[in-house]
Amino acid sequence: MVAVADPTLRVERAMHREGVKFVIGCDEVGRGAIAGPVGVGVAVVGPGVRSYPSGLRDSKMLSEKRREELAPLAASWSLYRAVGLASSQEIDAIGIMAALGLAGRRALTELHDAGVAIHESVVLLDGAFDWLSPALSKPPRVRLRIKADRDCASVAAASVIAKVHRDRLMIQEAARLPGYGWEGNKGYGSAQHYAAIDSLGASDLHRHTWLHAR
């Protein structure tokens, strides 16, 4: 197995040297699930940012137990943090890409309300496609970076914070609507999950347009 390097703050510090006030690491979670919301996490770092929590990684590279341990550390390390959600009903109504933008807008609105100067900041967005800017009337600067969740500490922090937030919501919903295995699959399309849909029918938390395309 090829070892994956730890994330760094090189990209964030380079932006600060360019005069950027805040770097807002941004990542999405739940995009490929068939039930539950999609979430967008944001984690803010400023020019004085120091070393990040030991063991921080992209959430997909961590066990659930380790994510739970790291999430409060990542949250307290970040100057500000937020998670925006778009519901399964919103995903059905407007599609997943627009729903990602809606969740991102909600996360940035929370940062704005907390006092973050969004338009003096740069959003460091994981991936190769900017789904965020079209959802905003006055978008901030967005810098795309493939594998930013792996390579950039601010984005890794946003990934962990958002993943734990969404997972906890799905575990709560599993108690309300038992039988789908959400405490384990978190709304993703496992064989057990599809079998439960065949047996129980789809719930109000499922993305019905996705099931119709199955």
Image (cartoon, helix red, strand yellow):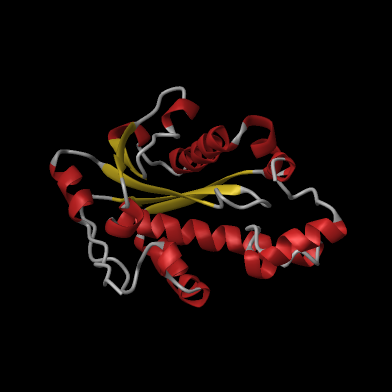
View extreme (left): residue: 17
Q: Quadrant of residue 79?
A: bottom left
200 vs 25, nearest the viewer: 200
Quarter of the image with the N terminus in it? bottom left
- Say which residue appears at 69% left-offset and 64% top-offset: 191
Q: Is residue 146 left or right of residue 170?
A: left
Q: Is residue 29 above or below residue 103?
A: below
Reply above or below: 16 against 173.
Answer: above
Residue lying farthest to the front in this orientation: 214
Q: Measuring from the top left, give residue 9's x and y in whole percent.
A: 22, 57
Residue 95 on image: x %, y %: 61, 34
Which residue is painted at 32% across and 59% down in the image? 150
Q: What residue is at 38 percent from the left and 59 percent from the top?
A: 157
Q: Residue furthest top?
A: 137
* Tally of marks: 0
Q: Is residue 203 above or below residue 101?
A: below
Is 150 left or right of 32, judged from the image as shown? left
Q: Residue furthest right?
A: 200
Instruction: Classify residue 199 as left or right of residue 95.
Output: right
Q: Position of residue 152 (x, y in %)?
A: 28, 55
Residue 55: x, y in percent? 33, 73
